[in-house]
Image: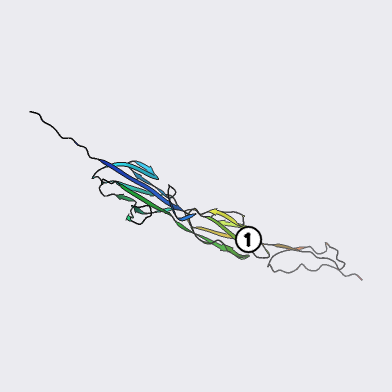
Amino acid sequence: TTTLYAQWSVNAYDLKVYAYSNSASGLDNFANNTVGGTVSFAEETGEKVEAKVNYGEVSTLVAEAAEGNAFVGWYTDASFANKVSSNASYTTPVMVVAGLTYYAKFTANKYTVSLEAGVGIARVSGAAEYLYGAEINISAEVEAGYTWSGWTGYVTTVSNPYSFTMPASDVELTSEYREHNYKVIFKANDGSETEATEEQTFTYTETKALTKNSFTREG
């Protein structure tokens, strides 16, 4: 008598996972990279993870957004037409013969630049909402009688205009100024300077009395 035993093993099929993100320079241009975040599966993390999964088994995928970015969702296509979950952790359906492919979509967050103009500043420009990582240019126009001192707040700098890369937070900046100082010099009738009356220093827009006239009249 001969006894035969049938043996078999479960087939494994491909599970492919990709991280797609945009940037401030290309809001609608998504690419496979780790700019916006990473994907994790089967103890691997990166912009692309591929592994074999047994037929009939489920898998858990994890998406982690990078600083200044947000996770949008899991999709089954790179054009992001078919969204299957908005959760960063997603459990797939059971593996099928054709294999499974998923795309994690990340997008850059928006933050606000606020600029304050005080007395002596005619106008400021550059205040708006920007994407994380965008190159920002701000400037201030100083009125006559005032001198530019610089920006304070998020950063302290005397540069005007000033450029910076948008951080992962709102930015507040104040344009600083100082008033010009002017000297009043007293001269005799012949136009010559004299030490009889000391010169005075005035700040622009300042009102104060002139030094008492100490000239004497001869004859």
- Residue at the bottom extreme of this rendering: 219
Quarter of the picture containing the N terminus is top left
Screen quadrant of the C terminus: bottom right
Tell me residue 110's x, y (percent): 46, 58
Residue 128 picture location, percent across and down: 51, 62
Q: Quadrant of residue 119?
A: bottom right
Q: How many marks?
A: 1
Crowd class of label 1 (few under 14; some 14 to 19; many from 20; radius 10 Å): some
Name the residue located 78 percent from the left edge and 63 percent from the top edge. 199
- Dividing the picture into quadrants, the one containing residue 136 is bottom right
Vertical side of 105 occupied by 14: above or below: above
In the picture as drawn, the residue positioned furthest to the right comes out as 219
Extreme residue in the left direction: 1
Q: Nearer the viewer, residue 212 or 17?
A: 17
Q: Residue furthest top?
A: 1
Q: Coloring scheme of the render?
A: rainbow
Along the viewing direction, whichever of 51 and 146 lies nearer the viewer: 51
In the image: residue 21, left or right of residue 189: left
Q: Secondary structure at mark 1?
A: strand
Between 85 and 203, the one nearer to me in the picture: 85
Give the image quarter of residue 116.
Answer: bottom right
x%, y% of residue 181? 71, 62
Question: Could you tell me the amino acid type at mark 1?
Answer: Tyr
Q: Which residue is mark 1?
A: 177
Q: Relative to 44, does residue 143 appear above or below in the rendering?
A: below
Percent across and percent down for residue 108 are: 44, 54
